[in-house]
Each structure stands twice: as structure tokens, then as C-alpha cells.
Image (cartoon, rainbow, N blue to C red):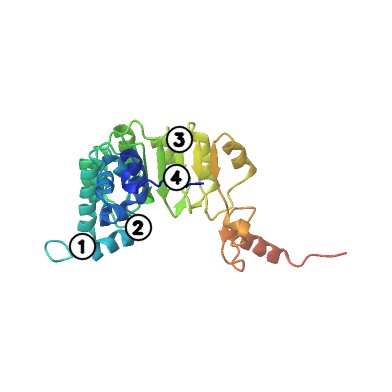
Amino acid sequence: MATPPSQPWAELQHDLLVAIMSRVGAPDLLSGGAPRACSSWRAAARDPFAWRRVDLRDWAALTSGRRAAGPGPSGRHLPVHAALAAILEVAAVRAAGRMEAVLLPEFADEDHLLFLAERSPNLHYFSLPGTFMAYDKFCKAIGKLHSLKGMAVDESLIHHDVLLHVLQCCPGFVELKVFALYVDEEMASVICDCLPRLKKLEIPSSDMSSAAIIKFLDCLEELEYLDISGYETSSISSAVLDKASRLKVFLWNSKFELGEFVDCSNCGEHNINPQEPCKCMMEHKVMDWLAGPTQTS
């Protein structure tokens, strides 16, 4: 039985090549690996639809290809902030206004976001994990992103004025991811009060109080997706599970289940070291000591 003739990759339909290039990733597209294969691949790699989602989180992969290509025209390598701005410029030009999502590296700041907002105002989602952002520049960037539907930001930006600005400037905003070490009821209240129409909320790997979880479930009436996986408390109770039953997706787990933490069932405090009991247990031990030895019959 004769094998069917194979079709050269270069002769694939342009739309199919664009779909492939959109999955190749920014490091390969920017370093010139895939685009250098042939003219049809180069055309697909430069098609705006291949740049709708730009993931720049792996900075090592991005810069290794650029280092291999040698320094810029000035003969010197750019500092990382300037290098990222240059990459964003290339991505924005190639996307031609069609960029929908961008995931920035950890060192990216509000200047990079503003740079991007001025060149890609139709952005739907961005991830900006950097800390200690200047509120004014961040809000200026948000003011240019009226089509924004979601963002991933550090807990330092979970501020009443900042989130209200997001709500006012971005009427379709429904998705929030927060990089936080600890989430209490106060932070939960800020999110619920300022962004009441959230449908998707992600706060993974965070120490979160039971009150905060219940606040989200009670106040975010349109919430469909809640991810609090990897947290370090045992706040999941039957009450929480009952309230979360209305969600389409509820992701959670507890390091207590792996025996990494001990928990006081009375006050909810926890500690990594079982030899260091919580304040509640200490008070019980003091009261037992004051009461003296138990009398046995």
C-alpha cells in the first residue's frame, strides 16, 4: 500500500501556520528561530493574530536568544527594564492593536504597563506580579485600558481607590488574581466592595482566614470560579463547602492535610512547629496548672 505524499510544512495554509505560531511562544518568535525557517513561516510569525497572547514571564528564555544574537547596534546589552520595553515595543507593533493578554516578568513595573497601555489599548488581561507600584502611574495605565476584563497583581495594589478606579474605567472587568502572602477579612472586603461583579477570583498559595473566604462567597454574588489552592490554613469547614457549592469551580487544598501544620480547633491558629502551641492552648495549660492536679477517686 502506497503511502500518501507528504506536504511540505512551508505549504501549510497561512491560518494554520498562524495558529501554530501563536503557540510557539514569545521567546522563539522574538529570537528568530521559527521565523527564520522560510518566508511562509516568517509571514505567519509576524501576523498580528500570532501576538494576541504574549507570555514574557520566562525572562531567562527570552534573553538567552537575544544574547546569542549578540548586542544591539550600540554594541552594549540593554539593562533589563529597557530590554523589556524594547520587547514590548516589538510585540505591540506586530500585534497591531490585537494584543489581548500579556504576562509580564516579576521585575516589570507600572512604567512598563503604561508603555503597553499606550500601544495596546484593547488589552483584555495582564499579569503584573511586581510589588510597590506607584498608584498614580498604575491608575493612569488603567485609565487607557477600557476593554480590560481581568488582571493579576500584587496585594499592594489591593487598595480601595485603585480598585474603584478599575471598576470605573473598565466596565467589563470580571477576573482578578492576587499574589498575596496573607488575606484577611479586611482585604476581602475591599475586593468585594470595589469589584462586586467578579466572576473569577484567584488567590493561590496564600494564608487566608475563614472569614475572608466566607466574605468572598457571601458578597460576590456573580462569582463562578474561586481558586484558593495551596493556602496554609485549615479554613475549609462544612459551612464554607456549603456556600461554595453554588460555584462552577472551587479549587482548594490544605497543607494541613499533608501533616505540615498543626491547628487549634478552638481558635483556628496554626503553627509549623507542634512544640509551639497557640495562645489559646497556652492559656488552657496555664489554667490547668493553676487548678492544680486532677483528683482521682
Q: Which badge, 2 or 4, is on the more N-terminal residue? A: 4
Q: Which badge, 1 or 4, is on the more N-terminal residue? A: 4
For residue 172, above or below residue 114: above
Q: Which residue corresponds to mark 4?
A: 4
x 41%, y 48%: residue: 178
x 54%, y 36%: residue: 248
How many numbered marks are there?
4
Q: Which badge, 1 or 2, is on the more N-terminal residue? A: 2
Q: Which badge, 2 or 3, is on the more N-terminal residue? A: 2
Q: Nearer the viewer, mark 1 or mark 3?
A: 1
Q: Which residue corresponds to mark 2?
A: 58
Q: What kind of residue is marked 2?
A: Asp
**Neighbour class for label 3 at 10 Å: few (<14), some, many (≥20)?**
some
Task: Determine whether label 1 and label 3 are within 8 Å by CB.
Answer: no
Q: Nearer the viewer, mark 3 or mark 4?
A: 4
* Marks 2/4: CA–CA distance: 40 Å
Q: Secondary structure at mark 3?
A: loop
Q: Secondary structure at mark 1?
A: loop
Q: Nearer the viewer, residue 212 or 139?
A: 139
Q: Nearer the viewer, mark 2 or mark 4?
A: 4
Residue 287 lies, in percent from the top left, at: 67, 62
Q: Nearer the viewer, mark 1 or mark 4?
A: 4
**Neighbour class for label 4 at 10 Å: few (<14), some, many (≥20)?**
few
Q: What kind of residue is marked 4?
A: Pro
Q: Which residue corresponds to mark 1?
A: 79
What numbered label is drawn on residue 199? 3
